[in-house]
Image (spheres, rainbow, N blue to C red):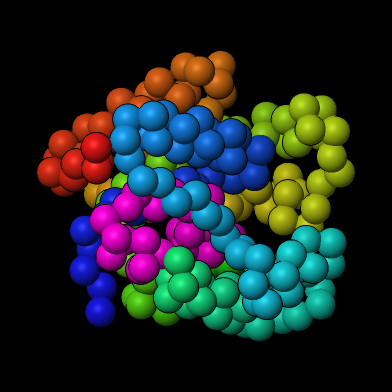
Amino acid sequence: MLVNKGFLIAFEGIDGTGKSTQLQLLADFLTARGCEVMVTREPTDGVYGQRIRKLYTDRSRCTPEEELELFILDRKEHVKNVIIPQLNEGNVVITDRYYYSTAAYQGVTEKDIQEIFKKNSFAPTPDLVVLLTMAPEVSIARIQEGRGEDLNDFEQLDQLRFVAANFASFTESCIQRVSASREILQVQAEIRRIVMEAFINKEYLCSE
């Protein structure tokens, strides 16, 4: 049974927005303030997560329905084995992607998106979603020039435009949008402010 004494933060956004960097900076900041922090990610490194990662180079390996099911199964394990136990301990859980990414990447229509949210009703609602925003053209330049990486099947321009539009349609109250086009520390400063305000609003106190 879930006794949500902790605080769940999900970092979301299209590829190339700097989620992993900003997430780790926040985790270090909160740890220094006395918080017990668990950093995690989706897809996980579990059986289903590994199958998802193989799709990065060839999404034709499975149908859209099978792809969605893999994400759901991976998340069920993640929630059961990582997220709920950590929240029960009263810790801060920061996940790099959550079910909002599944809805944005796998949801083709508004109906699809709502169905995906329903399929994820087993997953705890985040206390805060940090949604990093950026023009897809800029994010692709960061991936190719900044990281020196080739684009995978989830990072094509048309796909990212589609995903960005889906993210933009989400209106849940837990979502806070942050422009990721600025300097890293400027983005981080805004994220820290948002998180600390969310702690106050939720009356969450880190253990000292």
As drawn, the residue found furthest toward the front would be 208
Compared with residue 29, is residue 1 higher up or lower down, i.e. above or below? below
Q: Which of 201 and 59 is in front in this view?
A: 201
Q: Is residue 80 visible?
A: yes
Q: In which quarter of the image is the C terminus?
A: top left
**Residue 51 location (% of width, % of height):** 73, 74
Quadrant of the rendered image containing residue 194: top left
Q: Is residue 194 visible?
A: no
Determine if the magenta segment contains residue 173: no
Quadrant of the rendered image containing residue 19: top right
The magenta region covers 83-105
Compared with residue 114, is residue 138 higher up or lower down, i.e. above or below? above
Compared with residue 36, is residue 191 higher up or lower down, i.e. above or below? above
In the rendered structure, the answer to whether residue 202 lies left or right of residue 40 reads left
**Residue 52 location (% of width, % of height):** 70, 70
In the rendered structure, the answer to whether residue 197 lies left or right of residue 158 reads left
Compared with residue 47, is residue 105 higher up or lower down, i.e. above or below? above
Determine if the magenta segment contains residue 103: yes
Residue at screen point 60% across, 52% down: 162
Q: In which quarter of the image is the N terminus?
A: bottom left
| Labels in figure, total | 0
Residue at screen point 59% across, 40% down: 20
**Residue 55 location (% of width, % of height):** 77, 68
Residue at screen point 38% across, 24% down: 190
